[in-house]
Amino acid sequence: MYIHNKKLMYTVRVSEPNPMLANFLLEQFGGPQGELAAAMRYFTQAIAEDDPGRKDMLHDIATEELSHLEVIGSIVAMLNKGIKANLAEGALKEAELYMALGQGGDSHTTALHYGGGPALTNSAGVPWSAAYVDSIGEPTADLRSNIAAESRAKIVYERLINVTDDAGIKDALTFLMTREVAHQKAFEKALYAIEPNFPPGKLPPAPEFTNKYYNLSQGAEDVQGSWNSGKQWEVVEDVKLAAPVDKGDGSASVVLKKADKSLMEASAIRTMSDPTADPTTGAELGSSAN
């Protein structure tokens, strides 16, 4: 059960309307790294979670993300107040209204389609999608994805902070950015509280491939580090000699029923290309060289 508190989680102070900045901030409202995507990711994970500790944490953070969505939405609405008032009351002359609407980006779309309210789109006007929620139902995989999601969201907040001089907005965005760090720490703690937590899932990897590193991008700029050298790695440099890595013939095959095999052979014969043919094509007839 959810109960709405009319007070925002963090106070929003906007010094003056700015429709273009409002449009930028939609990235964290309805964008792939935004607060709605985060809330839905953690909320659905919480519902499916069987561990009581992780379930509680995911519900807490999902609910906080909804409060962050309210903060971002409120900033967007405040930034659009001026253009909303002028559109609603027709206070500006036509030329002035065009200038106010066309400040940049898709600010005119936000003003005209949504009346200055926060739209469930990203800053380019792309509608929010449930495809942004990438949960797979395995805690060790989902927690890693959550950590990455919080990291990406922090970077977007940094970029948004850098495009405004409004002290009040910078203050609120800094709070939201900082909470991404706090959530990342919580998810990391939850991940490492699962032992073992790598590799994800239950089935063990095939031992003959687990520690191999295939050097498939070779050249003068090859760099060695702990990710591709050392005792834990068996580095394969001559990939041509190593392939196929399973020591098979590298072909693809399937066992077909007799009737299916006959049909496939007939289809292959019917659609076979004649390697000796050199027909004149429409492209050649239309070419300026002819």
Image (spheres, rainbow, N blue to C red):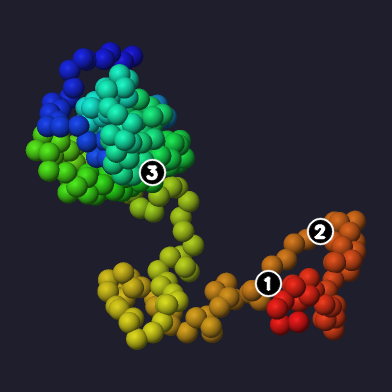
Give left or right: position of 153 versus 145.
left
Q: Residues within 10 Å of mark 1 (few under 14, many from 20)?
A: few
Q: Where is 69 relative to 24, above or below?
A: above
Q: How crowded is mark 3: few (under 14 residues within 10 Å), some or many (20 or more)?
A: some
Q: Residue furthest left?
A: 167
Q: Name the residue at 12% across, 29% down.
A: 13
Of the image marks 1 and 2, the number of the one nearer the N terminus: 1
Going by the numbered disc 2, the residue's amino acid type is Leu
What residue is shown with label 3?
124
- Residue 187 x %, y %: 26, 41
What residue is shown with label 2?
256
Of the image marks 3 and 1, the number of the one nearer the N terminus: 3
Name the mark on residue 251: 1
Of the image marks 2 and 3, the number of the one nearer the N terminus: 3
Going by the numbered disc 1, the residue's amino acid type is Ser
Residues tagged 3 and 1 counted as in contact (Cβ below 8 A): no
Going by the numbered disc 3, the residue's amino acid type is Ala
Foreground pick, 235 / 1: 1
